[in-house]
Every structure is written in C-alpha cells, then in structure tokens.
Amino acid sequence: MDCDKFESAMMDDLYGELDELTSAALKRHVASCAACAGLLDGLRATLRVATVPRVQPPADLEARILRAAFPSPVSAVSTISVAPAASHQAPPSVRVPSIVPFGRRAARALSVAGNWAMRPQTAMAAVFLVMIGTSGLLLRGRSSRAPAGAAVTVTEEGTPAPVAAGGGLAGGSPSPLAGPTPGAPAAAANNADPLASAAPLGAIGALRSSAASSGGGPFASAAAGAPGQGALAMNGPGDDGKPSAGLGRAAARLSGAPKAAPARKGAVAGADGPFADFRGTASAPPAHDEAVAEPTAAEAARETPTSAQAPPAPPPPVVAQSAPAAAPMAAAPAAAAPASAPSYPAASFDDAMNAYRARRFDDASRSFDALSSGDPRADLWAARAQREGNGCGAAVARFDEVASRVPGTPVGWDAALDGGRCYRFLGNAAGARARLTPLLKVPAYADRARAELSALSHAPASGGASSRP
Amino acid sequence: MVRFQRGDPAAFTLLVRRHQVPLYNFALRQLGGQAAAEDVVQETFVRVAQNAAEFKQAARLTTWLYTIARNLCVDSLRKMGLRRHASLDEPARESDGAGATLGERVADARSNVERAMLSTQIGEQVVRAVLDLPEDQREVFLLREVSSLPFKEIAEIVGAQENTVKSRMRYALLRLQSALSDLEEYARALR
C-alpha cells in the first residue's frame, strides 16, 4: 500500500470498517511511513477528543410532534393514547388518519400489476390467449354460418366427352339415356352418379366436400369451364371457340356478375351453407350457350334424357369440334329459355322440379302445366313428367306439341329428341325417324339422334304404352 | 414504519421515541439552536407522517429521516443567512433559567473550573469547534459522529459520492484537530 491508497483507506480504518486484509496492509504501511503514521495518530486522537456531547430533547417534544403530525380535527379512523416521554405529562389523545389512502393503494397495486405486465412471460401468455380467443371466434362464426345439415350439392350432369376428344370429359356417350346404351357405358356410369363424373375435376372435387344434395348449380358450370376438363357445355354460339371462354363465364357467374335475365333461385339448392351467396346470382337464366344448372338428381340423370342444350351455332367451339358427341356438363330448363322467357315464381318452378326429382311425376306434371302458360320449357318438363309417370304413349303428343311450337330452338330440339325416343320405344319407327332425322343437322344433337336412329335400326321396338326411354 | 403504513398509529409513537434523540442532536449541532432544532425534528416527523405512503420498504428509514432533517436544516440555515454562529449576546438556551449568554459562559468557564466538569469544558469547546466547521463538513461529521451513520448512507443523505464524504470527514477532522490542539495535547496526556 502506498500513501495514496492509505489516505483513501484511512477513514475506514479510523472507524474499524476495513477488511482484515486491507487493514493489515495499512498497518504495514503505517509502520514504514512516518508521515502517514503521524496523520493517522492525529486524526485518531481528534476523534477521541472531539466527542460531541449528546443532549436530551425537551420532554414535551414527542407530544408536540404527535400533535403536529395528527391534529385532532382530522378525519381519524382510530384513536390512540400516546404515552408521554415524561411521566408528568398527561397522555394526549391522538387521532390518526388513514395512513395510506385507497387511491394510493390502488396506484401501488396498479404499479405492481404493470411490472408484471411488462414481463415477457406475461406478454407471451397474452398473445397465446388472443390467438386462442380469435380461433374460437372464427370457428364459432363459421359453424353458425354453416350449420350442420346445410349443404350444397354440386352436380355435374350430362355426358362427358370422350378422352380422345382432346381434353373433353371421359365417357363420351352420345346418348343421354342412362341405360346401358351400346357405346356409352361410361356415360351411364356418369349419369348414375353425377358427382362421380365430377370427381376428376379439381374444382368440383373441392366443392363436393361441402355438397350433399340437390341439383347442379353454377359450380357445374365452373367445373365445366375448367380448361381441359370438359368445357363443352360452356361453349356455344356466344363463345369464341376457346375453352377458356367457358371458364370466364363460369367465373363471372360465380362472382355474381349481373345477368340481363332475371335470376332464378335453385341453381344451388339448399344453399344455406358457405355458397349461399351464389344462390341469386348463379341462377340467372343464362344464354343458352352456357351450361347451367341441371335440375336433376341422380335419379333424374338416370331416368330422364339429359338435355344437351348446346345449340348448333356456328362456329362450333374448339372443344365441341374435338368432342362433338360430348354432352354438356349441365343443362337446365333455363338454358333453353330465350332472353324474353317469362319469369316464374322461383319457388313454384323449384317445387315442380323438386316434385320431378322426387318422382312425384303427377304432381310435377300438374305444377309444370300450371306454370307453363305458353312457355315451352315448362311444357317440355311437363311432357317429361308425363312420360315418367304415364309412359311414352301419354307424352309423345306433348313432345310433338312443344317441338312444333318452338322449332329450331334447344327446347324444340329436346322435345323432338325425347319425342323420337318415345316413338322408338312405342315401336313407331317412322314417327321416330321423322323426329330424329332433322336433329342430324344439329351438331349438338346429331350424335344422339344418330345413336337413336342406329338403335332404331338394330333393335326391335320395345313397344308398350307404359314403356319409357 | 411498515406497521405505521398499515395503519398502526402506535408504531409512529415508537418511531418518534426511537429516532428523536439522534435527530435532535444532529439538528442542534447543525443549527446551533435548541428551538430551531426542535422545529426541525418536529417538522421531520410531521413530513414522515404525511408522506408515509411514499416510503418504500426497500429503503432505509434512517436515510429518509435524515434526508428530510438535513434538508430542513439547510433551509433553516439559509433563512438564518450568515448567522451560522450563535451570537455571543444570544442566550444559549431558551430554557436556561440563568439566561447566560454563550460569551458569559465561555468566559465563566475558567472561573468556575472547580464547579464545572472538565468534560463539560471539553464538550463546549468541541461544540464550538464543530460549529466553526464549514457546513458540508459539519453535516458529514455530525451524521458520522452523532448519528453513527456509515459513510455510504451519509453519501445518500447529502447526495454526494462516498469518497467525497470521506474526504469531507477527513478535512473536518483536520480542522477540529487544529481547533482542539490544546485539548488534544490534554487528551494525549491522559493516555
């Protein structure tokens, strides 16, 4: 230890507050340094002499302090007797107010809580709780919007294009019949289960997860419009012949693009689910070149001749050229409706279609008849209901009536095709040929008409008033 | 103090009894007057009572008490202006029934040597020497010698570094050594 360090440690040594090691070093230095030794001795002697005498405060000081600290008029909460320092004084009565007011206690508690809140663990826990709460709200909201049981059925209808048709749908049956028509086994399978035919489609497959029942809808169109996945029904006179055109329209319909024609409910049946928003927009009666909702269930696809509504409009679409025999993905009665078609009360038309799907053909026939009021589409479906309910004998006249009333229209061609079929089943080959032969000139119907004629020439007529196609 | 914060008024009485004597002596030697010292002590405890909620349990009560008292002493000394030293014409104590002035008592000390205790003479000289110390050195000396506070706590009270406090203490002792040189000789003779 040198003199500088000695001076810094000297005061502590005077009061005995040095640690042993430093104290020993200081003593060694003092033993070797006369100046430091003299300084230390002088200060130690001064401390010994300069002892300030302690004086007792006045006896009444304590009482005065207590009186000053707790004046009597305060709003005291308690009263104590303070013993005086001196025995000769009477104990004053001191009223003590609340020491720590509630506000300060609350502020202190808030401060403590704030310290806890600033800890990382607390922040992490808060974030975790927010995440859980948000997830819970989202799940609850979704479940409330889509209650169990509410579902949307996406139905693909029609006969897919053959695989060789260059991106068209597989199957490629020219016949809309559900029966094992020669040359169209895949079509039968597809018609038997419309969703099965939609399964290969990515979009439809995704939609199927939420689909449960009811007929097709705009999703069928969307699926049909998917490039390379059978957009035949999407193409028509208004198309530019590119597969993507159908996709564009389908997308427009899904996004609620306004249509000139009034909307018809039912394109997406039971649409209480996530796709309920499409209900109104997707059901607008589209131009007949679009594939629209086919109001058929699996039974309808199997039992009824599916309407292939693609008109023979030139130029034929690219896909249609590559797969001319392909049936459209979906065809609804609305597809054949002209832009000026009368609008129906949506619930009534749907009721009629529901009755048709439920195989209550008498009810369906009556409903369509009540709705028809000169509309060939309702008449066509009324004829079909008659055919399903009472057989071809009761329906051929009505098919003929529709076909003669709106010739050259999809409804008329459908009526002619169905009528020709009925005549074939009734054994009237001449009548069948008379109605099917003109359809050979209509590209969209040519293959089916040709198939019917071929069946007419190869197979004997089944006959019977109750026979059905 | 914690009991007092929780609303126990009796705890404040204990607080006063425990700390009033060293506080009073510190203020008395710092100010040099009994009345001023009593006022400082009383005001110190009043402020403690009023601001008890502000006191944090982690702090030392003595540090808080002496900080208040020291600030009050500083204020009082400022009010007194340059009159740091007791006037020789002023009665030394208000309660002194004789009303003798400090000059009279100092002058009278040698004449009454047989009646007065030697320690009293030494004490009075020490008191005068302490009063002659500069204010910053005096407060450090008093806090250390009268209140027996460690240098670290003194540093907190006066708001200075600990080494600065030690330095002030050293200079105070050197001044007292010079002022009490005759008494020191006497003290050495006593050894």
Image (cartoon, coloured by chain):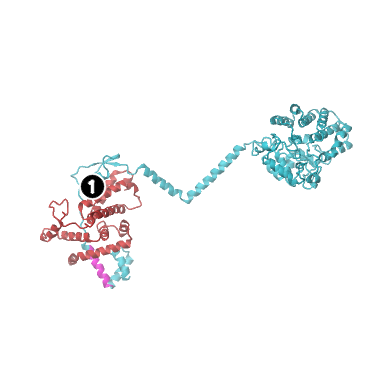
Amino acid type of disc 1? Glu
Q: Which residues are magenta?
A: A33-47
Query: Residue A432, image x and y in percent?
Result: 86, 33
> How packed is label 1: few (under 14 Cα within 10 Å), some, or many (20 or more)?
many
Compared with A210, A26 (above or below) is below
Q: Is residue A348 magenta?
A: no
Query: Residue B186, image x and y in percent?
Result: 17, 65
Relative to A203, A380 lies left or right: right
From the image, state the color of chain B: red
A142, B84: nearer the viewer: B84
From the image, state the color of chain A: cyan
Judging by the rendered image, the residue that carries numbered circle 1 is A62
Query: Residue A34, image x and y in percent?
Result: 26, 72
Query: Residue B157, image x and y in percent?
Result: 31, 56
At 17% from the left and 57% from the top, the residue drawn is B87
- Callout 1: chain: A
Q: Quadrant of the N terminus of chain A?
A: bottom left
SS type, badge 1: helix
Q: Is residue B129 visible?
A: yes
